[in-house]
Amino acid sequence: MFSDPALDRHFTGHSGSITQLRFSPEGSQIATSSLDASVILWNLNQAARCIRFGSHAAPVFGVSWSPKGNLVASAGHDRTVKIWEPKVRGVSGEFVAHSKPVRSIDFDPTGHMMLTASDDKSVKMWRVAKRQFISSFAQQTNWVRAAKFSPNGKMIATVCDDKSLRIYDVNSGECVRTFTEERAAPRQVAWHPWGNMVAVALGCNRIKIFDVAASQLLQLYVVHSAPVNDVAFHPSGHFLLSGSDDCTIRILDLLEGRPIYTLTGHTDAVNAVGFSHNGEKFATGGNDRQLLVWQSNLHTYDATKFEAKSALASSSCDTSAASSYQQSNASSTAQSNDRSIRIDMRQSQAYKSLDENFQVLDSEHTKQPQTPKSASKSSSATTLSGRPSSRGNSLVAKELDFKPRSPSPRFFQ
């Protein structure tokens, strides 16, 4: 059956805007970074607790899971990178990575190396185990918003406020491709799962997809009415997810070159989007401090039935499935008319049943006002409404395991 995306879970817990989100490799947790100077690990199992890591002294802009899922790295305005075990009493380490705020962080496919991008105009590569600087990629002339390893770890994509997308060769350190945008600076970049294309979220309301090898623009989408903040490819490579200052989320069918879903309900800018590694779920977060977790149902999508379903949705008065045509400008490479199915998740039961009592445990590295009596090593748990509860178990920290789980993915030409 051709099923639409559906809201699965609705969380609140951050006191500031959500800046980035990442699913854990096995898909059971989501890490969110926030302007409230914390990272929260949300456990998607109904009965489980989540963990707040508040070691940063300023807003956190980026978060990343190691490929094995045994480490989380976060980076922020305080210029530091924190590497920590995703446990209440997990080991935590830190180092000052740049001379100015760090905007993004990313593990390579082996988990041995990390990339950091900063307002100091540089991108740096680090050896994770020793927190050792390896090399710098510094051809940018303004703030670097993001830097990402390609799926095989051999290339790096960076986006910068100098309105550039740059592709670097990891081994040589050379910039092998440069794409420039005249209208506005890019805000985020994502690699296609095949490793031969990148998508860029632009401040001029556009999304561009480039062929890296051929050094050419493949697709251009104008489906948002405000700057685009984040993009993410579905693991199949056939769909793209985007979030924008216009408060909407879009799903694009890349094979047909058209938007197929417009998801509404966030009450402010959508800053972060991401798919789980199997593509069954995706999550969205933004300035309204809400984390929304969706069943993607994209494995059921049938392009041949889309037109009929879109027409049926537009004539339906069932607001729970929502459904009007969204007219917008479009590029010559995309469809001239946006006939995407519109879904307002605020009408769903999952949105109304907010997980407001979901329990949060503060990691022992979280900085918080404490009396001398309460400043012991045992952490106290609180629900999101602020009520105290007993922790019930303690976790013994283990030494960090930096062994990669598997070889790097293949690079598809």
Image (tube, helix red, strand yellow):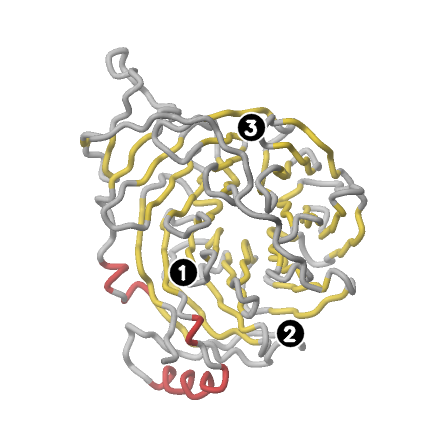
Disc number lying in front (1 or 3): 1
Q: Label 2 sits on what residue type? A: Ser
Q: Label 1 sits on what residue type? A: Lys
Q: Quadrant of residue 332?
A: bottom right
Q: Label 3 sits on what residue type? A: Thr
* Badge 2 density bin: few <14, some 14–19, many ≥20, Cα 10 Å: some
* Residue to which mark 3 is pinned: 80
Provide residue 283's location: percent of width, then percent of height.
Answer: 41, 56
Instruction: In the rendered structure, find residue 281 and report the number of the disc placed on it.
Output: 1
In the image, is residue 197 above or below residue 37? below
Provide residue 240's location: percent of width, then percent of height.
Answer: 54, 65
Residue sitting at x 59%, y 62%? 205
Q: Earlier in the sequence, mark 1 or mark 3?
A: 3
Q: Quadrant of residue 54?
A: top left
Callout 1 secondary element? strand
Report how far apart the C-alphas of labels 2 and 3 lie in the structure: 40 Å
Residue sitting at x 31%, y 40%? 50
Residue nearer the viewer, 147 or 44: 44
* Residue to which mark 2 is pinned: 331
